[in-house]
Each structure stands twice: as C-alpha cells, then as structure tokens.
Image: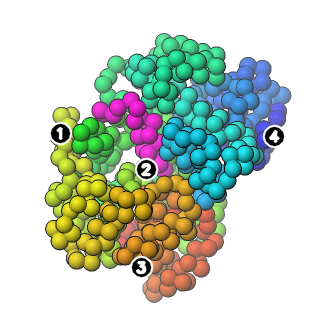
Amino acid sequence: MMRDPTTTELPDLQTCEQARLSRDARFDGLFFTAVTSTGIYCRPVCPAPPPRRENISYYANAAAAEAAGFRPCLRCRPELAPRNDVLRRGDSSVARALRMIDAGMLDEHSLADMARHLALSDRQLRRLFVARLGATPMQVHSTRRLLFAKQLLGETALPITQIALASGFRSLRRFNAAFQSAYQLAPRTLRKRPGAGADKVLLLRLGYRPPYDFAALLDFLRARALPGLEHVDDMSYARVIGSAERPAWLRVSACGDGDHALRLALHGVAPADLLGVVTRARRMFDLDADPHAIAAVLARDRTLRPLLRRHPGLRLPGAWDGFELAARAVLGQQVSVAAARTLAQRLLHAHGPRVALVDAPALERLFPSAAAMADIDPATLGVTRMRAATLHALACAVRDGALDFAPTRTLDAWETRWVALPGIGAWTAHYIALRALSHPDAFPANDLILRRAAADDARALSAKAMGARAEAWRPWRAYAVMHLWRNATRSGRST
C-alpha cells in the first residue's frame, strides 16, 4: 500500500484505508484508490470487493492517477465523483489556476498565457501543480475533458461526434485518439453499456459529498426567484439559460434514489456548451464542497457549533450569471429580500428579452445583459436616481471589461476593484463574491442581520468586532454567513 509521493493533498494513510474499506461517501473524490495489479483506479465508494492492501496506491485526484498510468474503473465511474474543491477555493495560485481551467482557459489559450495571468512562468506553474496535485495543468485539463466525455457516453444518447465537441475536442479523430490512449478503449465500447437513453432531454448525475442540505438551498433560492426567469418548488430549481437567439433551460432536482447526487436536466443546450453548463451548475449548487473540512473549522465557535449540528450540509447558494447577480445585489442594497425581488422583477419584465420555450411556458424571459443595460436610460429603471446611476455604471463597467467575474483575482483584489465603482461598498462586493464567485471566504461584515446573529446579546456587533470575531472562521467565512443568515431567518430576525 503506497501513498502518492508527489502530492501533499491526501488524507493520511490510515484514514484512506479505513474510508475505502468502509466505502465512506464523505471521502468520495478526496482521494482515489489505484490498484497496481489491474491498472485501474477507483473511488473510495467502489462496490467492487476491496483489493489487497499491498496492491493499493492512493492518489489525491483523478489527474494524478491517470498521469501515473491508471485507467478509471467502469464500475464506480470516477467521473461521477465530486471534486476536491478545497484545492479550487481561496486565493492561492493553484486554486485560481484550477478555476481558470474550469472556465475553459486552456481551450483557447496556452499554458504560458494562463501563467501570465497569475504572474508566474509556465515552468513555475507546472512545478506548483505537480507539487500540489501530482499532475501538470495540461494533464488536469485533459483528464477533465475525458472524464466528462466518459459521463456523456454512459448517460446520454448523444452521437459520439457531439460528445467529442462537448468535451472540448475539435475533431473526432483527436477525440478517439486521446480516449484510446488514456483508457485503452474506443469511445464506442462504452456506448454499448446499459443506461444510455434516447430522450431529447439530457439527464446527468451531479455527485456531491454528504451531508448536503438541498432543501435549505432551495429555500434560499425560492425567496429570491424571479418568475419568468426562474421557478423553484419544494423539489427542484429551474431557469432559462442561453441567449435570446438560442434559449435553453435547465432543472436541478434531487435524484431520489438514495444516491449522493442531484439530477441535472438540460433542454436545448448545444453540445459545445455542455461542459460549461455542467461546470456552472456544479458551482451554483456548491456540489464539490467538503462539509467536514468546513465544519472542522467553524465548529470551534460556540455560536456556530449548534447551527452546524442543525444544518450539517448547508452550502453556498451560487448564482448562474455574474452580472445578473451583481445587478440584483445593487437593487437589494438597504432593502428587504422581498423588496429587492420586486425591484428585480420589474427590471426583468421591462427590459428582459422574451423567449419561447415550448416545454416550459412559465420560463419566458432572460435577464438583460450588461450591454443591453448599458444602453437603457437610467431614468427608466424604476429605482432611485442614485441606484439607477450605480446600475448604469455597473453595466458599462462589465460591458467594457473594467469589471468582470474572472477567477484569477484574490478576494482583496476583487473588493478593491468593485468598491471603486460609485455606489458599490464592501457589503455589496463581498455579497457578489459569495454568490457569483462562490468564494468561501467572502464576508459582508457590515450586514446588520449577520452582526445581530453573531452577537451574544440583543445588541448587534460593530462591523469591526464582527470582522475580528470572524478571523477564526477563515477560510470558510462565507459558510458561517450562510449558517447565521439561515438561523436568523428561522428565528424571524431576517428582513
């Protein structure tokens, strides 16, 4: 039994051994078990009989296992495992680089281009990846594409040419060659396996690490949902995506089969957009979080400890579109959630383009884009003059590239850029970072409800005291925010 010597991100050997023997779903995706006698790597939850200890090597991620020459198990399907999101969160160079890979940076740009965005050389970036992940950036990028292709082959009836396109390959020949080289299988071999349907709707499983409080996340989204753009019920979230020219929609719901996964239903999504849509859905529903790593830090706080016991799987409610969330955050400044929703609804119906979705008639509008909003007379936005001026400035800044939602900046750099815009303060900047970026340490310290919820008596903490109290919650302050907000809502203190 061996530990992958190239990476420091593995749990200790005893933990890995106990987790694989007990098939502990809490460790799914946090490490992979490679079997030297078969050349296969598995999830710790693999239902196959456990291999002998002397034939086991452990790897912190799928890319490291594949870089070492192992192939994914066809039974437990490593492509369905949640990722180790601890590596992608925060402000380290590796975390930002991984988020850039997820955003498709290496589809269109070179490794040197990505390294320049991080103020590194490509050699430095490769060295960091090998030290932290056991694989180079290009190996991580390749594994991501091939595992997504493997999921599409097993769960959909898409033609292989479209799967090649969906997984980022520009030719079928290159896709077949890469798949054969990595897995010693032709893609069509997996297409013969059961489970591929012929429905027009694409149904994909999105795995997560338990516990997961899907009901609480739906509650949060339901209170803010905009009819016509979104629909949230007790079991699912649906919304319009795409463009006015090519509208599509999605629904996310619980699988209902006892598996640790959500079901993503995609309607009208072009194959070339599939990987990006799935990546955004995973981020929006915070499916790659490690709740036990988060709880290990937050449970040290006397106020948070009972809240963690009450909602052990609370996640960050992400947003589908960064500009949409930013505009709605501006509308929500210093007003209640209900009032902010009303203002956003007026904006949507006045300026959001109509779409026609035959199979979802209740979903009929897209949120106006930054370019469209920049061309709207601020006086017609139906809000105060100062709020309208901020919305117009926000739209112009996003349209012109002065503000963006790129994953390359640190939280401090993000805040600095956003508060430079008139009408955007620290609260708004951090709220946008929490939801549009899913930044785990975003912390709107000025929030009155948050300061009341964290206080030991009836008086709210000052923003300074709130910030000092939250230092012990790093790097998971955003999760502490969600627990405190949730508790305030339940106790009737939310507005």
Q: Quadrant of the N terminus?
A: top right
Is residue 280 highlighted in magenta?
yes
State the mark number for residue 356.
Answer: 1
Q: Nearer the viewer, residue 315 or 117?
A: 117
Mark earlier in primary sequence (3, 4):
4
State the mark number for residue 448.
Answer: 3
Q: Quadrant of residue 181?
A: top right
Mark earlier in primary sequence (3, 2):
2
SS state under label 2:
helix
Q: Position of residue 279 (x, y in %)?
A: 47, 42
Q: Is label 4 in contact with label 1 (beta carbons under 8 Å)? A: no
Residue sitting at x 44%, y 45%: 280
Extent of the magenta region: 267-286
Instruction: Judge left or right: residue 122 versus residue 85.
Output: right
SS state under label 3:
helix
Circle 3: residue type: Leu
Is residue 152 highlighted in magenta?
no
Inter-mark Cα distance, 3 to 4: 48 Å
Circle 1: residue type: Ala
Q: Quadrant of the C terminus?
A: bottom left
Inter-mark Cα distance, 3 to 2: 25 Å
Tell us which disc is closer to us: 3 or 2: 2
State the mark number for residue 5.
Answer: 4
Using the image, determine if residue 451 lies above or below residue 98: below
Residue sitting at x 58%, y 40%: 110
* Mark 4 surroundings within 10 Å by alpha-carbon count, few (fewer than 14), some (14 through 19), many (20 or more): few
SS state under label 4:
loop
Residue that mark 2 sits on: 284
